[in-house]
Image (spheres, grey):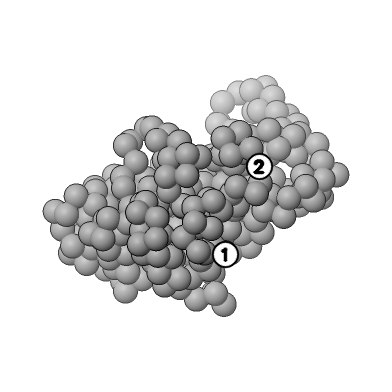
Amino acid sequence: MTQIKNKPSVSFPYTKSVLVLYYNKRVLRAAGIEAPPATWDAFLQQCRQIKERTGKHAISIDVDCSTISGMIFSMGGVIIEDGISQYDSPESVRVFTLIETLFKEKLAFQNPPRTFNDETAFSNDEIAFLLRTSAQYSYLENLMEDHDNWGIAPIPQADLDNPGTVLSGGNLTIFNTTQEQQRTAWAFIRYFTSPEISARWALGTGYLPVRLSAAQHPDMQAFWAQWPDNRVAFDCLIFAHPEPNLAGWQEIRGLVENAETEVITGLKSGEQAARDLKEKADRILAQSRRID
């Protein structure tokens, strides 16, 4: 629930996805790697091994706030606590430092904004990994064709006993208009989120079913039975965290992406970018509290 002009606003989820790790089995095999990394330490080790043995970049990095959020959650960190940003936490600093290392050692390249160059590179065996939303599944399925060529895994973790990833996606909201319009909107939500339609939507788009009844639908069960990796994203829901839902967050998202760009381009170290981001984010949060 969020507050809009001192009035409660309730929304219903319908397009939900989680951050996952896509991996190219052909590139991993060429580097002598049998399985995707479960931890961030193993991830960095594999990236170095891929570079050393194949000469290829290991991953393409998309400048994206939600990806940073998912990585912070996977490190065991939080983003905002008690109205104060936590971008200077050890977990957050570790994320930005990891990105710094990937680019300093030429293990990664930046995907140009609003392009799908990374997916093309992935399908052409030019990189081994993609950190992308589970909703990218349908695109990669068409590109990769054979499941022997690729796979899906939870993103690497700092502590396998306390995993985390990010939950993203849109919600449906009924605005305070006429009673007839509200009844019509509610009828649509009930229809769209019914088990059969929710399952059909998930299967057709790559988004996750948002109700347990939809997850139990025979079509979803058949889809998961076809290939074990089809179920990976759904199983990540139990440890997925939403991003903050408070005033100022959209502006902070832009700051996070600016900080990531500063690290990628070498303008700042990962630690300095994280600490500067914390100061800027806190100013926005403080300003938002004064406005409220």
In three-dimensional space, the C-alpha distance between marks 2 and 1, rounded to whole angstroms, equals 17 Å
Residue type at numbered disc 2: Asp
The quarter of the picture where residue 43 lies is bottom left
**Pick the front one: 144 or 114:** 144
- Is 58 left, or right, of 138 in this rendering? left
Residue at the left extreme?
267
**Pick the front one: 164 or 8:** 164
- Secondary structure beneath label 2: loop
**Pick the front one: 88 or 50:** 50
* Residue corresponding to mark 2: 146
Question: Dot 1: within a 10 Å radius of its alpha carbon, few (fewer than 14), some, or many (20 or more) residues?
Answer: few
Above or below, comparing residue 132 to residue 283 in the picture: above
Residue 103 visible in the current orientation:
yes
- Secondary structure beneath label 1: loop
**Residue 34's disc number:** 1
- Contact check, label 2 and label 1, Cβ < 8 Å: no
**Of marks 2 and 1, which one's residue comes earlier in the chain?**
1
Residue 193, percent from left and from top: 72, 38
The quarter of the picture where residue 272 lies is bottom left
- Is 155 left, or right, of 85 in this rendering? right
Above or below, comparing residue 85 to residue 63 in the picture: below
Residue 167, percent from left and from top: 53, 52
Residue at screen point 72% across, 55% down:
228
Residue type at numbered disc 1: Glu
Residue 9, percent from left and from top: 53, 43
